[in-house]
Image: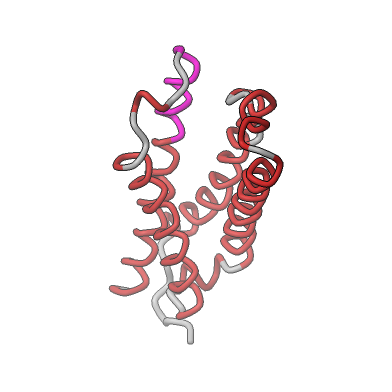
Amino acid sequence: MRRSIEPPVAINNLITALASAQLLVLLASFQVPTRLRWKEDLPKLGPFNAKLMWTYGAFTVYTIVTWSILTFALRGDLAAGTSAGLAVALAIFLFWLARIATDAFYFKSDDWPKGPFMQIGHALLNALFAFLCFGYGSIVVWGIIA
């Protein structure tokens, strides 16, 4: 069921920015195997565990691409605050919130690779995750109050 209130242009622009921003995460994720030296480190795990890491990575990429596609495809539902739009926005919000919480409470700063490039990349990724979390959270709030 669509709402009769026309969403502001800012909501529509936010939805487009969120769908695009998800794809930016992939720029970093495609660098993970090289930058984190998976060729050196994964063989130490054994064949099954190494394959498991690649599988986890592939499913994470698939999930992020799916979130982006759903955001583009359901932008009308997201803007109108339909049940489907709110469900998708809430799921994506929780995904990115969990990612931020993992970084804040599980990973240690000593765990991250050293060097200015990696530190800047880490900060930029966290900023991007925060934008995604705040953006999808805003869509949920907009959908509830509009």
Please state, as top left, top right, bottom left or bottom right, where the C terminus lies in the image: bottom left
Where residue 21 appears, as percent x and y from the top left, is 54, 44
Q: Residue at x 67, y 50 (%)?
A: 55
Vertical position of residue 37 compared to residue 66: above or below: above
Locate residue 47: give its quadrant.
top right
Where residue 128 appears, as percent x and y from the top left, is 44, 39
Q: Residue at x 58, y 39 (%)?
A: 24
Locate residue 106: give its quadrant.
top left
Q: Which residues are magenta?
A: 115-125
Q: Is residue 139 left or right of residue 40?
A: left
Q: Nearer the viewer, residue 16 or 129?
A: 129
Q: Is residue 100 left or right of residue 60?
A: left
- Say whether residue 136 is magenta: no
Vertical position of residue 137 compared to residue 110: above or below: below
- Say whether residue 120 is magenta: yes
Where residue 12 appears, as percent x and y from the top left, is 49, 59
Vertical position of residue 144 compared to residue 10: above or below: below
Q: Residue at x 32, y 74 (%)?
A: 144
Q: Nearer the viewer, residue 89 or 73?
A: 89
